[in-house]
Each structure stands twice: as C-alpha cells, then as structure tokens.
Amino acid sequence: MYTLQNLGCAHCAAEMQHQIGKLPGVTDCVLVYETRQLRVTGNDPDALLPDIRRICASIENGAKVLAPEDEHEEQSSPLGELIAGALCFAAGLLLPQPGVKLALLVLAYLLLGWRVLWTALRNLTKGRVFDENFLMSLATIGAFCIQEYAEAVGVMLFYRIGEYFEDRAVERSRRQIMSAVDLRPETVQLADGADVRTVPAAEARVGDIVLVRPGDRIPLDGEVVEGESRLDTSAVTGEPVPVRVAKGDSVLSGCVNTDGLLRLRVTHVLAESMVQRILDSVENAAARKPKLDRFITRFSRVYTPAVVGIALLTALVPGFVTGDWARWVYTALTFLVISCPCALVLSVPLSYFAGIGAGSKRGILFKGGVSLEALAGVKTVVMDKTGTVTEGNFAVQRAVPADGGTASGLLALAAACEAASTHPIAGSILAAAAAQGAPARAVTDIRETAGEGVEALLDGKPVLCGNRKLMERHGVDLSAYQGEKGGTEVLLAVDGVFAGHVVIADTVKADATEAVSRLKRQGLRTAMLTGDGEDSANAVAADVGIDEVRARLLPQDKLEALADIREKNGAALFVGDGINDAPVLAGADVGAAMGSGADAAIEAADVVFMHAGLGAVPDAVSIARGTGAIARQNIIFALAVKALVMVLGLAGGASMWLAVFADSGVAMLCVLNSIRLLYRKS
C-alpha cells in the first residue's frame, strides 16, 4: 500500500494505474484517486517502487509515491507562480510599449506554463500525446503563432487558476469525506491505579483501563468496568437515540460519552476496533469501482483522440475552403482545450466516494461503488424475519384469562409453573411477570414433559401449563378457548378447568412498519422469507405491510425462493442477520446484513447496517439512487457544456477562455455537485 502526494488529475491517476499494471511481476494494481492510495499486488511490489515512482512522476509533474514508512511530506503549492504570472500578465496588458508588452507576456506565459510545457515535453518523448498538458501547450503555443499573445497567456492563467481551485475543491472534498468516517483517536487516557497518563491510542493494549470523560469519544472497543452514562452512537450506527450503558456493558469506539465518567477495559486494540474497521471499509470500498466509472475511464481514452481529430479537421477543411486560416486554426485550438477529459474522469468516482461517505455517516457501510450501483437498480427488497423484521426475542404479547380470572393472576400462575424451566418461552413469561409486578404464586411438585409443558400442584390442586396436547391428554374442556394466529400460545388449567392462555410472539421492530412504507413509496416490492410457521409469518407480514411471504423455509429453500422472486420481479436486495442467511446474501443482487448479526452474514454482504433498525434499508436505497443520479448529472453536464462550446466555436462564438471553463470550471462544479451527498438529509 502506497500513498500519492501532489496527485491532482483523475485522468492521470487512471493512466498511472494502467501503466503500473503492465509492469512485470504485477498481478493487480488499483489506484484510488479519492483516497490517493495505490495498492499493488505481485511477487515483490517493493522492489518495483523505483519504477512505480518513475511512472507516476512522468505522468503528473511533482507526483510522489510514499511507502508506509516514509515521513509525511508537504505537497507543493503553485500559488507563488500563479501570483507572479498574474502580475506580469496584468503589467503586459497595461503597458503601451509593444516590445515591453510582448516581453512581459512571454515572461508571464513561462511563469504560468513552464510546468505544463515541461510535463508535455517529457510525456511526448514517451509517446503520450493525448494528455491535458500537451493539449494545453499546443493550444496556447498555437495562439502565439497566430499572434494572439494576450489570449494565450490569459488562457494559461485561467487554466492554472481553474486547476488550482479544482485541486483545492477535490482535496477539501476528500478531507470532508474522510473526516466524516475517520473517528480514530490520537491519544487515550490510560488509568494506572490512581494515576492517569495520556498515551498514543496505538499503544493501548487489551486489558488496559481507559478513562473516558463526559464529552469524549470512546477511543477503543471495550467493556465498562466502572460508571454509568449515555452514549451518542450516531457516528457509528446512525441511530440518534442515546444508549445507556453501565458496568459490564460492551461499548464501541467512535461513540460519544454524553453524561458520566466511564472506565473501560480495552477489548480490542486500535487496529481491530470499530473506528478502524469503518475507515478500512470506506477505503476498501473506494477501490471497488462501479461499471459506470470503468466505462467513463475507457470512454475518455476514445473521447480525447476523437476531439483532437475533429480539431484537426476543423483547422484544415474549412481553412482550405474559405482561406480564413486564422479563424479556423483558432477554433481548432479551442477544441484542443475542450478535449481534456478531467471533468469526466473525476466526476464519477468522486460521486460514488461521497455516497460511500454519506452512508458511513448514517451507519451504513457500502462495500464499494459496485454495491451502490447495484442497489440503485433493485426492484424488490427481500427480508428475513427473525432479527431483521422482528427483534429476535420472544415476549409476552397478552394474557387472556377465562371467565372470572385476571390477566395478572394468570401471568403469575404461568410464571410460577415455568420458574424452573430453561426454555426461551419460560424466560419470556418470567420476564413479563416481573415487569408487570404480578403477584407471586407458589407451586410444588413441578414436572416438565418435553413437547407438552409443565404439571404442578397449587394448594394441593393440579395445575397444567403447556400446549393443547397437554390439555387434551388430561381431558381439559377447551370449548371456551379460541385459538389465535401469529404467536405461540401457552394454555393453563387449574384442577381440570381451563384458566386461560398466554400469547407469546417475537416483537416486531419499532421502525419496521414505517421502513416498509418508505420502501413502497420508493416503488419497491417487499417480500419476507422465514423458517417460521405460516401463521406467525403471515401475522408479522400483515402487521408490517409486507407484500409477499414464504414460510417454513430451510436455508437452501431460501436461496430457491429468492431466485424465483428475482425471476418474477427483477433485481433483489436481501436483508438478513443470521449465519444461515450467508448463502442467500451472497446469492442476491445485493446482500445487506445487520451489523448486530453473525460475522458470516456480515462477511457475505455487500452492505452492512451498523444498527438493527430496519429504517436503514430505505436510507441505503435513497443514498444509492442519489449517488447514481449525481454521477449521471455530472457526466451529462460535462459533455453538454463541452458540446455547446464546440458548437459555439464552429459558429465563431466561443473563445479559448470559454473552452478552459468547459474543462477546469466544469470539473470544479462537478466536484461541488458530488460533495452535496454528504449534506443530504435522509
């Protein structure tokens, strides 16, 4: 992994990647312009570092390739040259003496354009003709040849100013995106007994005790050993509601401690903590380029020679016909300036990088521009039930007593019978009874029968607590019992008389109904695949508003069901969290995993939601669609402006000044258009 400095041209970055990829021994090469990171895979990439540096420096003047161990170097700034050149240019325009005027204009041109001219000359000796340096050099020297001295210098000045502000805009955008996702701490407060000392975060080790004061960000993943507080988890999970933590709770790095003083035992070092995992996911995502990005890179290699060819024909054909060589050569020179492809090559990757950053701010980790591009095209959202649409924990929904009883009394009786059981249903009954303050009931001689329930004695009377099978075996009259759908029912009887039933079901997530409604407003069809019974699945689907339900599915059945849904409705997004969802996540057009789910599911997914709320799904779709729309806007805008200036040039209404705007000015506007994704409200 290497870092590039003074890299300001997206088209040059693409050319660097292409040239480095052809070096002997290189099996793969990815240069991510947005993060300035170069990843080279091969037998011994470090041995190729001199060749890599030579290639990068030859393509973009001043570009430096830094190895991880290299010290940080300041990027060079052309601001001094710009100011000096601009002053000479202004003096040349104001002074009346022709000889002095020409001398100042030539000096201004050399001050402003020497980097461009030198880079163009070096690239020309290597056979690289269609780069922006050569095209700009040819256009401005051509203007000198037709005695348009002031315009030649002015165009070079405008080009350098546009290039400078474009670089600053890209760098600012890059910093904004990375600062939104880079939550790594520089230091931590390490507690050693009564002493507290500040140490670099990378030096903290597992087991160390770290002090986190109110207002501080949690520096490393850990476990609370002392104190209580509320944590703002929005930077990590996108969830705006603060979470209360106390002794024994696990906390993630990147969250903000809002209230009390906490002492944490470090469970993961910095390199393995959540803040580093989020940063790595964004940097790795930037390297996975969407089809649109790869298409534009290929298109630019055809576009530039094509426009140069048009420029040549524009100079020769009308010149021979009309004899007005000055006009048509000038028009051809404007075409050369327009042919620089930077605005096109820059606009798409920066749009997707901004989309990845916008997702990270909301707790949505996209594993590349490919995932964003695919998500924008889905037609159906397919969800697992348990842990995705529901909370994944059984809870008592209601206690329904028979005639003459009370709900609290029935719940207390069920809790007494289930007190010794370890079954999840028993746990939910005990939790509900404790939460409602149901009166304690004492039963004796408890006997549990697998698959049926519990038998016990209450004041010498037999008590039954279980399913219909248990009741029927003991001859209990169930004529007063009306079965319900959508949950598990525990029936109770005292001394052979039916006493009522308790309904237990998995709790639907609080935001599930609203999330599904938003998905439908986005024009998406919804479906649910689950291994649960049909009654329970249909009840949840009806409650939430899901269009299609398929129940009693094994993992392999889910994959077949997904294939059938895709065939009927088109591209599908599958959202799951369990380890048994991994095959379906991998088989979907886009797989999304809840960050609270199994590691295998998260690894197989294209998108990871850092919190368990279902509302992240429509958020992700919105970001993906917005990213694609902005990328297309940038492409259409750049091509439209260039085409318009070409038409105006043919009509005699466009100058080289306007052509420079069609290159550098449009590129800067595309950068600003891309970065607004970071500030877009969900």
Image (cartoon, rainbow, N blue to C red):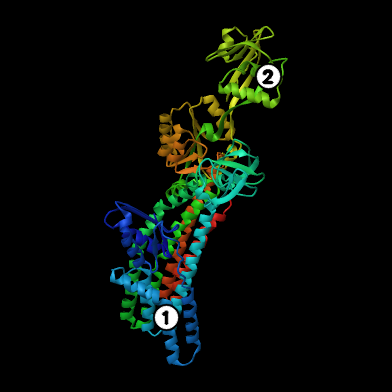
Give the vertical position of 530 relative to 626 (above or below): above
124 lies above or below 591: below
Q: Position of residue 394 (x, y in %)?
A: 58, 27
Pick the front one: 263 or 50: 263
Instruction: Look at the numbered disc 2 and give the secondary structure of its residue.
Output: helix
Calculate the distance from the C-alpha at mark 1 to the C-alpha at mark 2: 91 Å
Q: Residue furthest left?
A: 24
Answer above or below: position of 621 versus 325: above
Tell me, yes or no, if residue 289 can be seen here.
no
Q: Most extreme residue toward the bottom, as rendered? A: 97
The front one of 414 and 518 is: 414
- The type of residue carrying mark 2 is Ala
Question: Dot 1 surroundings within 10 Å: few (below 14), some, or many (20 or more)?
Answer: many
Assign a secondary structure to mark 1: helix
Residue annotated with mark 2: 412
Q: What amino acid is labelled 1 in the image?
A: Tyr
Q: Residues within 10 Å of mark 2 (few under 14, many from 20)?
A: many
* Rendered residue at 43%/80% (across/down): 153
* Residue 582 vertical placement versus 349 (above, below): above
Which residue is label 1 attached to? Answer: 109
